[in-house]
């Protein structure tokens, strides 16, 4: 049995058995619990810790485990209605209202209910994470000399150097001095937006794009202006027009396996994007989230935009989170010129620095022999999962339109039939036992069509992907029956 399941089950049993004991009465010892429930001492320790956090038991070193006394009555809730006025009375709201809407992000962060297949997540499942290598790296990191000291605010030098080599590639155009360590990719996005654009300014974004970017921009008082994307990436002629019309000085893009479309920015358009930014006197924020999520049949990847940018026009961000674990919140920003100091200042004010043990653990991980093996395993598994989902969609839902199947990342972007209600479909899918992501949160303005984003990474196994598509077919039959009939 999986350790985490064992802990949860034992905690449930102990919680139920507490009624046998009076407040202050001693419970069986840890050794007795191990023997009675046939679990490991670690499982007992973690289950008891859960009950202690819940206030149900008290542990006394050397004495044992005791049932806690009755809890004090909760204080009466206060009147918080005044906050409606305080949170909305913004004198600048006539120009660009600040809003904090995390719904689109929460859809990828919330774990689904038991029995629901996850097609809306953004992380690898436990079976594809390098959990043993992570545990070993964390243990070694904790023993490194100075591991618990205060780190440099820019990050540990060795880790900055590793990210610089990853970002700069063979050209060596990025050095450790150009890199800042961040608390993951989302933190890097927020830092870049706050550093590069003043409140009230327009910021150009791909359309569609990652909901976390839109949420971060709006929370910073910025106005996202959409620039349409096709299978070759952002359309340069529309990017030129958007720069001129909006006066924006920042364009945020994902040139590699864009989220959600999977588009790969073509060589011609890469040059055009940099040229458009140069003419507008603007920065390009390059979100390189998917470079480590390449499939084994993808072929050589293009270099980063930052590697071909000697003038400091590109601010690059990347992260180890997607390829490792949701809890390894370690990423990097890379920039050149005066903007680097601005980025450093914003990050320092926001968070001081990233935990040094976490940085040291990241260093241990990427330097271990297990790291290249992990990358190869993920590349192979993502290709296989992509093919399983494509085959299942062709078999079960041929009426849903797929522009292309990217050979990187872990999602497919499906256009629904005209007139489809994507929110109703997502609700029906959840009732059928599969969680999907509606397309609306990926657009800064009204979309021209309805979409679904399906992620094949979070599923526990390939068979679960096929089963999830079958469940989605049930939902489509319920909600889109007439629309599907018109198409087929």
Image (cartoon, grey):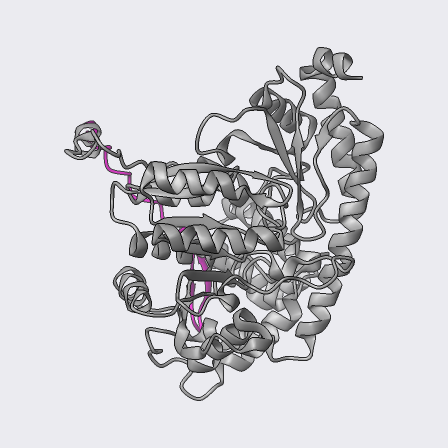
* Residue ID at (56%, 79%): 364
| Viewer-proximal residue among 435 and 63 | 435
The image quarter containing residue 182 is bottom left
Q: Main secondary structure of the magenta part?
A: loop
| Viewer-proximal residue among 323 and 404 | 404
Residue 212: x, y in percent? 45, 44
Residue 419: x, y in percent? 61, 15
Q: Quadrant of the C terminus?
A: top right
* Residue ID at (80%, 51%): 384
The image quarter containing residue 415 is top right
Q: Residue furthest bottom?
A: 145
* Residue ID at (43%, 55%): 285
In this rendering, the count of numbered labels is: 0
| Viewer-proximal residue among 344 and 30 | 344
Residue 471: x, y in percent? 74, 29
Residue 131 located within the stretch drawn in magenta: no
Q: Is residue 432 left or right of residue 120?
A: right
Residue span colored magenta? 54-82
Is 156 placed above or below 273 here?
below
| Viewer-proximal residue among 63 and 171 | 171
* Residue ID at (42%, 81%): 157
Can residue 262 be seen? yes
Q: Is residue 339 left or right of residue 314?
A: left
The image quarter containing residue 130 is bottom right
């Amino acid at each position: 049995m999986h350790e985490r399941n064992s802990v949860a089950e034992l905690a449930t049993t102990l919680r139920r058995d507490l009624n046998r004991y009076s407040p202050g009465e001693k419970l069986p010892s840890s050794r007795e619990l191990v023997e009675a429930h046939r679990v490991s001492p670690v499982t007992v320790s973690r289950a008891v810790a859960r009950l202690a956090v819940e206030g149900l038991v008290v542990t006394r070193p050397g004495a044992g485990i005791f049932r806690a006394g009755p809890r004090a009555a909760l204080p009466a809730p206060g009147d918080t209605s005044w906050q409606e006025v305080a949170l909305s009375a913004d004198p600048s709201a006539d120009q660009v209202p600040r809003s904090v809407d995390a719904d689109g992000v929460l859809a990828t962060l919330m774990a689904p209910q038991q029995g629901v297949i996850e097609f809306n997540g953004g992380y690898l499942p436990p079976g594809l994470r390098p959990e043993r290598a992570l545990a070993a790296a964390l243990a070694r990191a904790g023993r490194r000399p100075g591991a618990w000291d205060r780190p440099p605010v820019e990050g540990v030098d060795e880790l900055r150097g590793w990210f610089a080599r990853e970002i700069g590639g063979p050209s060596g155009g990025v050095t450790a001095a150009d890199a800042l360590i961040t608390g993951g990719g989302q933190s890097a996005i927020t830092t870049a937006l706050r550093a590069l654009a003043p409140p009230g300014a327009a910021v150009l974004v791909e359309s569609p794009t990652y909901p976390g970017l839109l949420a971060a921009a709006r929370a910073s008082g910025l106005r996202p202006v959409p620039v349409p994307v096709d299978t070759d990436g952002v359309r340069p002629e529309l990017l030129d027009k958007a720069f001129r019309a909006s006066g924006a000085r920042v364009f945020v893009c994902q040139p590699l396996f864009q989220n959600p479309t999977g588009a790969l920015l073509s060589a011609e358009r890469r040059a055009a994007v940099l040229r458009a930014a140069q003419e507008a006197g603007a920065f390009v924020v390059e979100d390189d989230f998917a470079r480590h999520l390449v499939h084994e049949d993808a072929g050589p990847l293009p270099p980063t935009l930052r590697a071909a940018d000697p003038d400091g026009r590109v601010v690059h961000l990347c992260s180890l989170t997607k390829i490792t674990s949701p809890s390894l919140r370690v990423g990097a920003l890379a920039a050149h010129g005066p903007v680097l100091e601005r980025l450093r200042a914003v990050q320092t004010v926001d968070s001081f620095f990233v935990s040094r043990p976490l940085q040291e653990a990241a260093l241990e991980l990427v330097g271990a022999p297990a790291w290249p093996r992990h990358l190869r395993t993920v590349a192979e598994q993502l290709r296989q999962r992509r093919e399983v989902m494509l085959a299942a969609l062709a078999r079960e839902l041929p009426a849903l339109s797929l522009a292309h199947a990217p050979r990187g990342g872990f999602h497919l972007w499906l256009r629904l039939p005209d007139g489809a209600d994507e929110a109703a479909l997502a609700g029906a899918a959840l009732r059928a036992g599969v969680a999907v992501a509606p397309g609306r949160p990926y657009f800064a303005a009204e979309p021209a069509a309805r979409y679904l984003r399906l992620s094949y990474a979070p599923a526990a196994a390939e068979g679960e992907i096929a089963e999830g598509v079958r469940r989605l077919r049930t939902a489509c039959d319920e909600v889109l029956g007439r629309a599907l009939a018109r198409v087929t």
